[in-house]
Each structure stands twice: as C-alpha cells, then as structure tokens.
Image: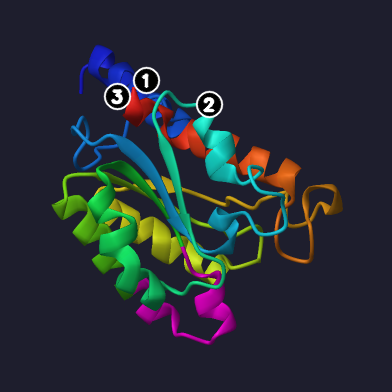
Amino acid sequence: MKKNNFWFLVFALILILAGYVKQEIKNLGNSGKNIICFGDSITFGYGANPGEDYPTALGKIVKLPVINAGVDGDTSFAALERLEQDVLSRKPRLVIVEFCGNDFLKKIPKENTVKNLAVIIERIQEKGAMVALADISAGVFFQEYRQAFKKLAAEKKAIFIPVLLNKIITNPAMKSDFFHPNARGYQVIAKRIYQAISAYIK
C-alpha cells in the first residue's frame, strides 16, 4: 500500500469513529412532513407537566413539526396495533421509535421485542420514512437490549440513538421517580436525540 493511501484510510477511519461521516440511512431525503416520536411513557412525558415532554422540547429545536405519539404503558405489541393510525397515516418524514421498558416489566422475551421492533421499522420504511431507534439503556440498566438494538438498527439502515437515559437515571435532579425523567431530564433527552438526527433532517 502506498504511503498516501495508508494515511487517507487512517484519516477516513478517524472521521467515521468521530461521527463525522454519516451512516447510510434508508429513505434519506424523503418527502414526509413530520417527525413522529413513537414510544411509551418516556416519549409521552410521564413525570413532567404537559408541554415538558421531550417531543415538545425537540420541536423547539428542529425546523419541522414534531408529533408526540407516546402512550404511557405501551409495549411493542401494543405499538404494532396502533402503528397505522398514530404513525403511518400522519405523513412521517422521520419516526423516533422508543420501546422496551414495559416489555421488560411484563417479562416479554427480548427476542419478541426485537422482532416487533423489526416489523415496526420495516413498515415505517415501506411508507417511505426514516427511522431512528432509541436505546434507553444506561450503564447496566437495560444493557441486554443495547447490542440487540444497535444490531437491528444497522441491519435495517436506521439511525441508532444509544444510552438515551445515561446520567439521567442516576441523577435525582433529572428524575420524577425511580425511572422516569422530569422536565429537566426530558430536555437532555431532546438534545441527545437532536444530535443523533440533525445530520439526516437538514
């Protein structure tokens, strides 16, 4: 290998590791109108006042309409049942998918959760929209889902948003109870999501 080619490859690898090179995402540049936040209590905004949820905070950052399609207590199975009405029928450009907490609490096998999310991602992409898959793990908290979600996002060419609750779940100043963020925590979540999706919505 020539010396110039070697250093070019090293430089490219550094850019990729630093996040400067965009991952290939399915349906990039589509004609959808809305960002739809599709999830459970974390998306709904449990533990905060109306208007203090992360979709509302995200809507103040991006230059696109943001719809909160979060339902408190939802599992991935329930999400499949309302996918058409709450997401596919609403002209999605990008859908942020956030599920697994209630699946875990209800002892739904992780493999079933991943299968459901795969179907959800596929159906959204068939509609022509991009998908961002959110991982709500933090440290050892929900870590068993982290690699599975990362692998799924890569396979489906979806944006992966890792460790969404990192340093929130362990910070009482950012939580309303043992698990759910408060208004301050949701602000942090909105900023993390924006950092993950900003390159794909410009």
Q: Nearer the viewer, mark 2 or mark 3?
A: 2
Q: Which kind of residue does numbered mark 1 sit on?
A: Phe
**Picture residue at 65% right of the left edge, 66% below the top:** 141
Q: Which residue is mark 1?
A: 11
Q: Position of residue 179 (x, y in %)?
A: 72, 64
Question: Disc 2 or disc 1, which is closer to the eye?
Answer: 2
Confirm whether residue 167 shows in the render: yes
Distance, label 2 to label 3, CA atoms, is: 35 Å
**Residue segment shown in magenta:** 99-114
The reply to whether discs 1 and 3 touch (Cβ–Cβ < 8 Å) is yes
Give, as a three-letter code, the residue at label 2.
Answer: Ile
Find out whether residue 118 is within the magenta segment: no
Q: Is residue 104 magenta?
A: yes
Please tell me which of labels 2 and 3 falls first in the chain: 3
SS assignment for the magenta stretch, majority: helix
Q: Seen in the image, is 70 located left or right of residue 83? A: right
Residue 23 position by quadrant: top left
Task: Name the outermost residue toward the right.
Answer: 172
Q: Is residue 96 left or right of residue 56?
A: left
Residue tagged 3: 9
Secondary structure of the residue carrying tag 1 is helix
The residue under label 2 is 61
Task: From the top left corner, tell me how far across and down residue 16 is, in percent.
Answer: 38, 30
Q: Nearer the viewer, residue 161 or 189?
A: 189
Residue shown at the point (66%, 38%) measured from the top left: 187
The residue that appears at 51% across and 64% down in the rendered structure is: 71
Q: Earlier in the sequence, mark 2 or mark 1?
A: 1
Q: Residue at x 21, y 60 (%)?
A: 122
* Identity, as a three-letter code, of the amino acid under mark 3: Leu
Question: Please, what secondary structure does the residue beneath circle 3 have?
Answer: helix
